[in-house]
Image (cartoon, rainbow, N blue to C red):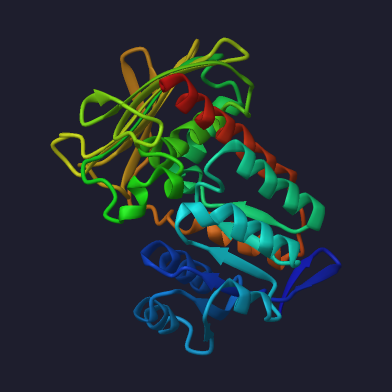
Amino acid sequence: MKAWISGEHAVTIKRPKLGFLGVGWIGRHRMKAILDSGAAEAAAIADPSADMAREAAALAPNAGIVSDLDALLDLELDGIVIATPSAAHAEQSIRALGAGFAVFCQKPLGRTASEVRAVVDASRTADRLLGVDLSYRHTQGMQQIRQLIRSNALGKIFAADLTFHNAYGPDKPWFYDKNQSGGGCVIDLGVHLVDLALWCLDFPSVTNVTSALRAGGKRLENKGQVEDFAAATLTLAGGEIIRLTCSWRLNAGCDAEIGADFFGTEGGASFRNVDGSFYDFTAVRMSGTSSETLALPPDDWGGRAAVDWARKLARGQRYDPACENVIAVAEAIDGIYGAGM
C-alpha cells in the first residue's frame, strides 16, 4: 500500500496484482520495468516455454508459474500483460477484459481494424483499463516534439516524413505467416510510424491513402504474402501529407534507420536514432538553417508505456476513452494494405 498526499487528502493506492502472458524478451522487459517502478507486483507467469517462464520467474520469485491464459483467468488478479504472437492478441485481450481484468497488450492490438475495434468495445463494456505498447510515444524526444506541435510553436504542420528500417527483420517464423502476423513490416514497424504521426496531430481523420508494398524488391504476388518494404502516403483531414517508409532486411548499412520529421509553417522538428541504434535517439527543433537540440541519449524509454498503464491501474482507473485512438491507427494500416494490393 502507498499513500499519496495532496493538500489535506491522502489517497491510498494498492499495488495491482498482475499476470504476465508471454515472457519472451519483450514480455520480460516490460515485466521488469513494471516491477522496478514499484507500480504493481507479479503474481503469475504463463509461457509455453518452460525456460522463458523460469527466466521471468527469476525477476519475481514469489510469482506462480501457470500453464496458460485459462489458468491466469482462474486467479485473483487485477490485470494481465500480454506479449504473445500477434494472432492471439485480440482474442486473448477480449477474454481477459470480459473476465474483469485490465489488459496491457503488445502491438498490434489486432491484425485488422475490426479486431482492434472488438477489443476496444470489450474494454468499454467491461469498464476495464486497456493499454497498448506503442512505446515510441514515451521517448523524451517525441514527447517534446508533440508538445511543440500542440502549442503551435511550429505553426501549422503541413507535412511529415517517418521511417523505420530494420536491417535484420524478425527471427520468428510466425512473422512471415500473414494469418498469424496480419502482415509484414507495415503492421510490425509501420504501426509505430502511423501512431506517432496521428498522435502528434491529435488524431485527425485520414481522408486518402496510397501505398506500394514489396517483397524481395517485387510487388506482392498474392494476398497471403507479407511485405518486407512499404512506402505510403496518408492525406489527413486538415490537408497534412504524411509519408511513411518501413522495411525488414533493407541494405541500410547499419542495424536500423528510425526517424520522424515534422514540418510546419513556423518551424520543424526531427526525431532520429543514433548510429543505427534501436534505443538511442536525438530530437531537434529546426528553424531555417539553424537547429536546437531538444533531447539526447541516454533515455530509458522502453518500458514507460507499461509502467504508465500500471500506475493508472493502481490509481483505480477503469475504461480509458483514449484507447479508441488505436482504432484510427488500425484503420490507417488497413488502408495501407488495401491500397498496396
Q: Nearer the viewer, residue 28 or 209?
A: 209
Question: Can you give x and y, in whole percent of width and height, for residue 41 in the image?
Answer: 59, 78
Task: From this view, report whether residue 108 is shown above or below residue 194.
Answer: below
Residue furthest bottom in the image: 62
Q: Position of residue 70 (x, y in %)?
A: 62, 74
* Picture quadrant where residue 243 is located: top left
Q: Is residue 38 visible?
A: no
Q: Quadrant of the C terminus?
A: top left
Q: Position of residue 245 (x, y in %)?
A: 34, 27
**Which residue in the rendered view is the most extreme toward the right?**
8
Quadrant occupied by the N terminus: bottom right
Give the residue drawn at x 63%, y 23%.
Answer: 204
Q: Position of residue 183 (x, y in %)?
A: 41, 39
Given residues 200 and 120, the one toward you in this image is 120
Q: What's the residue at 74%, 67% (across, down)?
A: 99
Counting labels gives 0
The residue depicted at 43 percent of the width and 47 percent of the height is 181
Name the residue: 45% across, 71% down. 32
Residue 159, relative to residue 190: is it above or below? above
Q: Is residue 25 above or below residue 200?
A: below
Q: Is residue 62 left or right of residue 170?
A: right
Q: Is residue 171 visible?
A: yes
